[in-house]
Image: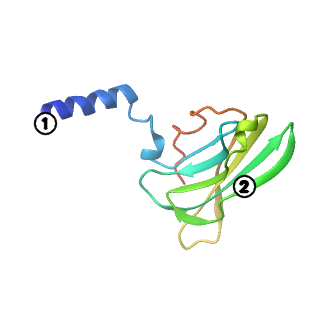
Amino acid sequence: MNNKKWFAIILMLFLITGNTSYAALNALSIHSRANCLNNESISWDGFHYWILATESWHYKVGEPVHLVGSGWENTWRSAGVHYGEGNRGGYRAVGYHHIRYEGSDTDKLLGVTNVTDCSIYNGWWEAHPPS
């Protein structure tokens, strides 16, 4: 395939998806999903490592069931996931997404995600750049 065809394909993909569609490819992104195969909360960045911790609190019928957390790690993807739990339905996942800067003992809350559905959207495309 020649360069003009590759350029046309890349341009079309860019126009179709837009330049902010995949925020984690541009900046740190946070999301949660519930009642999928898994219940989960995830913080991720497609190109950078951060010191992250992610907690995913799971509730059923309004009552807390448990907390699944990642602990602090220097990573591009921090996740609190309970594998196989979501297929039973009726859950709420509330994610607390934290960042700690190199050389600091203080953590900052990036954001909170609160969901009851399996939507792929729930925060995937929103950039949450650390400040």
| Mark 1 surroundings: few (<14), some (14-19) or many (≥20) residues within 10 A | few
Left or right side of 1 for 44:
right
Let me know if residue 122 appears in the view: yes
Residue 90 image-quadrant placement: top right
| SS label for mark 1 | helix
- Residue 52: name its quadrant: bottom right
Q: Residue at x 16, y 30 (%)?
A: 5
Q: CA distance from mark 1 to mark 2?
A: 48 Å
Front residue of 86/128: it is: 86
Asked if residue 90 lies left or right of residue 71, the reply is right
Residue drawn at 53 percent across, 70 percent down: 102
114 to 102, vertically: above or below = above
SS for tag 2? strand
Residue at the extreme bottom? 103
Residue at the (66%, 64%) spot, across then down: 71
For disc 1, the marked residue is 3
Dividing the image into 4 quarters, which one contains the C terminus? bottom right
- Taking depth in this image into account, of 114 and 81 the one nearest to the observer is 81
Is 61 rendered above or below residue 67?
above
Tell me if residue 57 comes above or below residue 124 in the rendering. below
Task: Give the residue type at disc 2.
Answer: Val
Q: Which residue is mark 2?
A: 68
Give amino acid for label 1: Asn
Measuring from the top left, give residue 119's x and y in whole percent.
61, 31
* Residue drawn at x 66%, y 37% as measured from the top left: 36
Q: Quadrant of the N terminus?
A: top left
Image x and y of residue 80, in percent: 66, 53
